[in-house]
Image: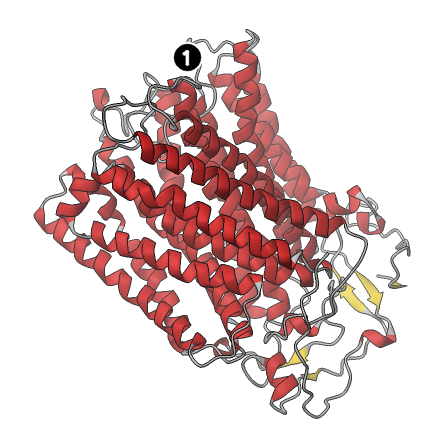
Amino acid sequence: MSSVLVHDKTELPVLRSGLGLPRPDHFVGWRDWFTTVDHKKIGVMYGAAACFFFLVGGVEALTIRTQLARPMQHIITAQLYNQLFTMHGTTMIFLGVMPLSAAFFNFVVPLQIGARDVAFPRLNAFSLWTFFAGASLLNVSWFLQVLNIIGILNPVDGRTDIVPGGGWFGYASLTEKPFTGIGTDVWVLSLQILGVASLAAAFNFIATIINLRAPGMTMMRLPVFCWMTLVTSFLIIFAFPPITIALGELLFDRTFQTNFFRVEGGGQPIFWQHLFWVFGHPEVYILVLPAMGIVSEVLPTFSRKPLFGYPIIVFSGAVIGLLGFAVWSHHMFATGLGKVATAAFSLLTMAIAVPTGVKIFNWVGTLWGGRIRYTVPMIFSLGFVWMFMLGGFSGIMHSAAPADAEQHDSYFIIAHFHYVLLGGILLGLLSGIYYWVPKIFGKMMNQKLGYWVAAMVIIGFNVTFGPMHYLGLIGMTRRTYTYLGDKGWNDWNLVCTIGSYILGMGVFLCFMDLVVTVFSKKRNCGPDPWNARTLEWSLPSPVPAYNYARLPIVSTRDAWWMDKHAGTPIEYDQADLSHGVHMPSQSWMPMGAGFGFFIFGLGIVLMSAGIPYCGYMAISGLVMVTFFIYLWALEGPGGYHLIVPSDATPPSPTPARTHAPVAASHH
């Protein structure tokens, strides 16, 4: 242990781990980011990756829409079309929405609960680098496809679909060897690796929220975003094992000719659907609950009144998570489940609308009578409530099995789930970006441009997906590569394509503004630019490495708001800070283990293609994962002390102070 004064250019003295190796605590620049265990930096890296993959998934979607703009076009091949919609769905769900939610989990949750870090900092870094491994493996398939086109990589089975092309749902037996090439192996292994990352993060956040809450912060004083993080983490833990089992069985079918799903060997393809949707429907709520948590933070802040019905909001979130496991077969009404099963799942699907509707009524109650400020985060949150509600209405239609049978596999379904995933979740996440970027970087995004972004995203989204309801009802099927010009679909498909470009431009402008904001040298906001309610806004912007010099003692919900306006000041512990604040040591081991997963997955894929000696690559990847985790255990937790500046310790409790709202500035 040693102490060092915190200054930007102070080099920390080199400490040694239990292995006798120097710890990377003194690194700056790129090496600092590669070895960091700071939850804030990990959150930033998750967010950067999510934004990048949102753009990748958006380009894939725009290519699909360009192909469908007019009838009988052949801008891309049918095989490439299958690969694009497979990669688009997989990318948006697993590489876009989930990591952007994880970015907010990482950055915001420890600050909201008054903690200095997550419970397991190195496990947090391991989750990040394992996510990078899975995401890289999935998208390296595009590079391998190019190698196939130019004649360098030629799979032994002669199949040229190197990029996954069996649908983001991977239905058996269409993903068996006779129907798809090594792209399916890429898809299976990528999702398995991404599952490891998600599970590691979920266990970490459960431990963090339960064990590291500030003194006095009972569970019913937790911010709603923390509650939704907790419920989401439990959903991940219980939902990922079924898909892990299904993916493992599929890989065994393809590699060792087992008969889990192979019809010719007595397998049952319908088992895949059950296992996939036992995961897939809770996954919807893994995606949507974080956005609901964001909206539950934003609406009270800009309504300038407490969240209406806090206990009901929390309880309904937990009920949504529980019922999410009981409705999976409404995705399978067309498979012949039988009358009893169909009736049961139909009723349960109707029931899950109740807690969702309760949340909407509570959000409306929060707005009712409030002094509403129409900031950019507020616009996106209001858009979330409206668009998600519309998606829910069409979802209730599918709870009726006869209606579902009529609309199944039509463009009506595409419209429905995009109203939930894009109109709901994306708008909620964009609200979170505009809301928390000032806290993350100490800089406001361009608010004038933000209004244009909101208009383009909301209008473009509705122009894109609104007409798809009609297209589905007049017979346009999902996964349509091209179509004849006499179907009555021509004009509406052109409208959808135009809307998709408006939507894409809006998202692109948001991310470009985010990049400009991050690299701007001018910090233009204070600690609390929104006059917000929760603890993270009591800290400087950007937040110091140690978060809280002294831990807050919480005596009420919305402690920061009550401190400012209600005469209930936050108290802080009086621990001796003469020795500094203990910080966890940084480590190379999580990144090394994550890289090992990538080598393992790539080796299996190339081995499936028949490339010689790639089995050894797969084995070396597993050895690398084991080796770095073993070193991780041996190096010990370490740690060092940062001596905090005297002006960083919070003042003694003071009388209530009134903070006037700070005007949102722009570039």
Count of picture labels: 1
Question: Is residue 326 shown to the viewer in this render?
Answer: no
Q: Quadrant of residue 352?
A: bottom left
Vertical placement of 91 versus 119: above or below?
above
Vertical placement of 656 versus 302: above or below?
below
Name of the residue lying farthest toward the top: 151
Vertical placement of 428 versus 58: above or below?
below
Q: Residue at x 57, y 69 (%)?
A: 211
What percent of the width, then of the height, locates residue 151?
55, 6
What percent of the width, then of the height, locates residue 77?
41, 17
What percent of the width, then of the height, locates residue 215?
61, 80
Label 1 sits on residue: 159
Disc 1 residue crowd, few under 14, some 14–19, many 20+, Cα 10 Å:
some
Secondary structure of the residue carrying tag 1 is loop
What percent of the width, then of the height, locates residue 665?
70, 64
For this view, does 632 lie left or right of residue 457?
A: right
Q: Nearer the viewer, residue 208 or 529?
A: 529
Q: Nearer the viewer, residue 124 or 409?
A: 409
Vertical placement of 253 versus 519: above or below?
above
Name of the residue lying farthest toward the left: 339
For this view, does 425 lie left or right of residue 542?
A: left
Q: Residue at x 64, y 85 (%)?
A: 563
Q: Residue at x 54, y 29 (%)?
A: 139
Q: Nearer the viewer, residue 664 or 101?
A: 664
